[in-house]
Amino acid sequence: MISDSIPDLKRLTPREKLILATELWENFRDSDQDDGVNEAVYRVLEERFSAYRDDPSTAVTWDEFRKRLGKE
């Protein structure tokens, strides 16, 4: 996991992590590199992230997500 190689990430507050994730996504989205992700995937990700920003209470934890998938 990348976070294991950057120990300071674990010290970030949840708000700081959200800000970092947003900055990383925007940087990734705006890059000129061919990343192999098609436009349909970008649209879905943008829509979901926008919905989360509009109402963060709709988000679920990783544990809840795994339960919904039947992985726990």
Image (cartoon, grey):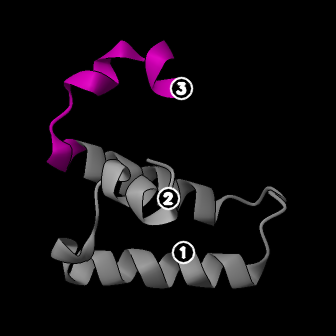
Q: Is residue 49 magenta?
A: no
Residue that carries the numbered disc 1 in the rendered image: 45
**Where residue 70 is drawn, which disc sits there?**
2
Mark closest to the chain's N terminus, 2 or 1 = 1
Q: Secondary structure at mark 3?
A: helix
Give the extent of the magenta segment: 1-16
Q: Is residue 23 left or right of residue 61?
A: right
Magenta highlight on residue 8:
yes
Which residue is nearer to you in this view: 41 or 23?
Answer: 41
Q: Earlier along the polypeptide chain: callout 1 or callout 3?
A: 3
Assign the magenta stretch its main secondary structure.
Answer: helix
User: Label 2, label 1: how many angstroms apart (C-alpha)?
Assistant: 23 Å
Task: Please report whichever mark, 3 or 2, sits nearer to the chain's N-terminal start.
Answer: 3
Q: Is residue 38 left or right of residue 27?
A: right
Q: Residue 58 location, x and y as percent? A: 24, 77
Tell me which amino acid carries mark 3. Answer: Ile
Which residue: 18% across, 44% down? 14
Residue at which label 3 appears:
2
